[in-house]
Every structure is written in C-alpha cells, then in structure tokens.
Image (cartoon, rainbow, N blue to C red):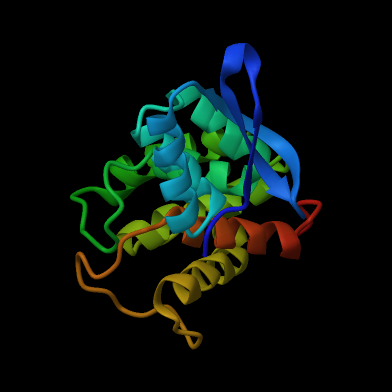
Amino acid sequence: MGIPIVWQPGLEGGKALWLSDAGRPHMLLLVVDSSESRNTVDRWAAQADSVPEFLEMLHLEGLIDLDRYQTLVRQHDPLYAAACAMLACLPHRRVGERIDDPPRELHPLIERMTQALEPFVPEPIARAIIADALGTYWVSWIGRREDLDHDVNAARQALNEVLTGASAGVRILQPGDLTLTPEAVRAMIGYVLETHPQGEI
C-alpha cells in the first residue's frame, strides 16, 4: 500500500518527516539527522499497510519513543488507539482459551477495558457494550449485563465478521483459532459508536 510522507527541512540541518494529504504535509511525525534513519523511514513508508503500522515500525526501530507513538496514533486514529488500549488489558490475544473462573477472572478484565476506553468513548453505555463484547468474545463466555445482551451480541458479531469473514453467527472456536487484532477491535468499536452514537440503547 505505502504511506504518503513528505520530507522538509528541519531544525539544525535535520529532516522533518510529515504525513501528507494530497501531497501537502499535515502531521509532523519526527525529525531525523542521519541518512540511515531517513532510509529506514522510507523503507517502512513503502512497506506499511496502514499509518498505525507505520508508526509502530518507527517506534520499534527506535525513531520515536512509546509516548510519542501513542500520541501520534491517538491523533491519527483515536479508535485504533482505543483498540490498542483495550488489548493491552488482556494477558494475551488468543481467542477461545478457557479460564478457570470466568466471573472472577473475566469481570475485572472487562472493568479494566471499560476504564481504558474512557479517553476515547464518552458514553458509559457504549463503553460497557464494547468492553463486554470484547471480553466475552475473547473467552467465549456470557456477558455481565443481561440488559445489554442484544447489543453485546451484535458487537461480538461485528468483531467476528472482521476476524473470520463469517456473517451468519459467531463461529464456535477452538483454543488458538484466532488472534485479536487492533484492526478488528477498532472495527467493532466503530460499529458500536455508529449504531449507538449517543449511547442510546
């Protein structure tokens, strides 16, 4: 795919890297002072399939620190940043593995994911649906909120469609069949916000 970037003169002889929109710089990413760093950036810009992936590669290459990476992702795509914040609450991303005591182990995870969503999703009902859907899909378990079952199931279905391509119900999974991705979780968050833009259920 490739990511559109623009290099411009930076401070003290360095080169400033910008994301571009229609050939015009619109978001400053970093300033580099070596041709080696610039070559690394150009290589990842040509290979990356998305801006979040490109930013992650810049972070892994040591060109931006974690705080800068998180700030840039949030500026570029708040829903992707929200998905990453939720996934960071899980001990792993594999779907369908059993846990010994789902109510005791899963409910605190769902609560942490709900809190992680606060900077990105202002509506508490939407946060509850999203966190419940992700947590229960992750371990194939029932939700905490019976009053939100319909909405949680619809969100789980949206997540399932992205991960599996299935559109007729949530597939029965074997442990390790699927791995949650930020892109899939982002799509599910977007679905919930689109169907309940004001948190109206």
- Determine whether 12 is above or below 48 in the image: above
- Determine whether 97 is above or below 117 in the image: below
Q: Where residue 27 appears, x then y in whole percent?
A: 70, 36
At 39% from the left and 38% from the top, the residue drawn is 89
**Residue sitting farthest toward the top:** 12
Q: Please tell me which residue lies in front, 54 or 43.
A: 43
Which quarter shows the C terminus?
Answer: bottom right
Q: Where residue 93 appears, x then y in whole percent?
A: 31, 52
At 44% from the left and 84% from the top, the residue drawn is 166
Q: Where residue 174 appears, x then y in whole percent?
A: 21, 73
At 65% from the left and 59% from the top, the residue drawn is 190
Q: Does 173 sit left or right of 24 as displayed?
A: left
Q: Please tell me which residue lies in front, 21 or 122.
A: 21
Q: Please tell me which residue lies in front, 120 or 41.
A: 41
Q: Is residue 90 visible?
A: yes
**Residue sitting farthest toward the bottom:** 168
> In which quarter of the view is residue 129 placed?
bottom right
At 19% from the left and 66% from the top, the residue drawn is 175
> In which quarter of the view is residue 189 placed?
bottom right
Report the number of numbered marks.
0
Q: Where residue 4 appears, x then y in whole percent?
A: 62, 52
Q: Please tell me which residue lies in front, 11 or 147.
A: 11
Q: Can residue 110 be seen in this view?
A: no
